Image (tube, rainbow, N blue to C red):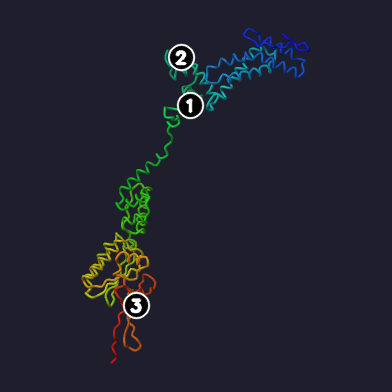
Amino acid sequence: MPQDHIGHTMPSRPVDIYDDLDHLAEQYVLDRAGLSPAQAARLRDETIRRLLPFAGRLAGRYRHGREPADDLEQVARLGLIKAVDRYDPDNGSFTAYAVSTIIGELKRYFRDHSWGLQVPRRLQDLSRVITRAGDELTAELRRPPTRAELAVRCGVSEDDVEEARRSREGYRPVSLSLPVGEGGGELGDLLGGSDHTLDLVPEQVTLRRLLDQLPARERRILLERFYGNRTQLEIAGDLGISQMHVSRLLNRTLAWLRAGMLTEETPAWPAESTDTAETNPVVTVRREPAGLRVILVGEVDQDNGPRLREVLLRLVRRAPAGSRLAIDLGGVPLLAAAGVAALLAVYEAGRGRRVEVTAVNLQPFVRRIAAVSGLGVLLRPDVRPPTESVVSPDGRWACAATAHRAAGPEREAEPHSAAGPVTTGSRRRARKPA
C-alpha cells in the first residue's frame, strides 16, 4: 500500500466483497495513533471513502420499497461514518459492528421518515411482523390467512392484528391531488364530507308541516317575503292592503311558526285580533242638526273595506232625504283601493237617495290619495259636531258651538271644494223674549 511522508500506510483502493474489513479497521486504528489531528482526519476520510461500497451493498437490501435509492444509500453512509468513528477493536469484529450500525440507521429512517402518518413504533414493528407472517401463511395454506390465524402465528390478539393492519394504511397515504379520470379531476373531488344540513332535517320537516297549515294569505305573504325577496310594500300592493297590515300579518305568522318549532304540539292559529283599531276601523256615529257624522279610526284596506261599505250604506238607507252624512277620516292613516271603492259606492248611494255624503278631516297623505283616486267630489270643509248652543248678546241669533272629536288635535277648517262652500255650523234666529 502507498505510504505518507511519515511512513504510515494510506489505503487507496475501494474494498470489495473479498476484502477483510476487520483487518482494515484494525490497521486504521493502529495507523491513527500518534498522528496529528489534520493527518488523522485525512486518514479517516480515506478509510470511509474506501468502505463506501460496503455501505451501498447494505442499502441495496431495502431498495425493493418505495423509498428513493439515493436516500437509502445516504442513510447507510451515515451509519458507516458512525461505525468508523465509534469502533473499538477490543469490542469485537468491525464487520459485525458496522452491519448492525448501518442497518439500525436504515430501520430508524424507515420508522421516522418513511411513514406518511405518525404511527407508534409498536404498531410499526407489529405491522412488519404481521406482513411477514401473512406471506408465510399464504404460502403454506395456499390462501390468504384469517385474522385468527395471523393472531396465533404472531402471538398477539385479533384486535392487535386489526389495529396493525389499519396502521399499515398510514405508511403511504394516497394524495388527494391524485388525478383521476380523463376530465382533469382529482381524488379529493370524489370524497364526500360531513353534511351539516342533515342536522336541520327535523326542523325542515316540522317547518314544512306548519307551512301547510297556514291560511292561504299568510302563507303567500311569508313565501313572497322570504323566498320571493319582495318588500312588504310590493306584497301589500298585490293584496290590496296596507304595508302596516302586511307587517302585522307577518309578525303574527312568524310568532306562530316560532311557537310551533319550539313545542311538540302544533299551536292553535291565533284568532283575529280583538283590537278593532288594528283590523277594522273604529266607527263612531254622532248626530248633527244637518245629519250624521261618522268618525273612522284605523286603516281602511281590502280586509275591512267591504265591511265598512255595508255599515255606511246602512246609514245612507236610514238617513232622510236632504240630510247630510259627513265621514270624518281624521283618524285614518292610510286609505287603500278597497276603501276608495267603498266611499265611492256610499257617495253614489247617497246621490240616489238625495243624501249629501262628504269626507272631512283628511290627513295630508290621505287627502292626496283621495284627490287622485276620484274622491274629490266628497271633499268638503270640516264640519264639527255641536256640543252646546250659544246665544249672541243681542239675542238675534244662536250658533252651534263645535267641540273637537277625541281622535286628534283641533284642526283648521279645510278649504272649500269645487262644489261650493259649506257652513261649519247651523244658524237660526233666536226668539225674542216676550
SS of the residue at dot 3? strand
Farthest top residue?
Answer: 18
SS of the residue at dot 1? loop
How many neighbours does mark 3 have within 10 angstroms: few (below 14), some (14-19), or many (20 or more)?
Answer: some
Judge whether 191 appears above or below 317 on screen.
Answer: above
Report the Cα–Cα distance between label 2 and label 1. 28 Å
Residue 318 found in image quarter: bottom left
Name the kind of residue labelled 2 in the image. Answer: Leu
In the rendering, at what x and y percent does residue 14 appear? 65, 11
Judge whether 210 appears above or below 182 on screen.
Answer: below
Name the kind of residue labelled 1 in the image. Answer: Val
CB within 8 Å, label 3 to label 1: no
How many neighbours does mark 2 have within 10 angstroms: few (below 14), some (14-19), or many (20 or more)?
Answer: some
Task: Provide the residue designation for mark 3.
Answer: 402
For image coordinates 38% across by 74% down, the residue present is 412
Task: Provide the residue designation for mark 2.
Answer: 137
SS of the residue at dot 2? helix
Task: Provide the residue designation for mark 1.
Answer: 174
Q: Nearer the viewer, mark 3 or mark 2?
A: 3
Judge whether 419 appears above or below 241 on screen.
Answer: below
In the rendering, at what x and y percent does residue 56 appear? 60, 15
Nearer-N-terminus badge (3/2)? 2
For image coordinates 29% across by 91% down, the residue present is 433
Nearer-N-terminus badge (2/1)? 2
Q: In the rendered view, does 134 fall on the left or right side of 20?
A: left
In the rendering, at what x and y percent does residue 295 appear? 32, 69
Q: Nearer the viewer, mark 2 or mark 1?
A: 1
How many neighbours does mark 1 have within 10 angstroms: few (below 14), some (14-19), or many (20 or more)?
Answer: few
Q: In the rendered view, does 23 fall on the left or right side of 57?
A: right
Name the kind of residue labelled 3 in the image. Answer: Thr
Farthest front residue?
Answer: 418
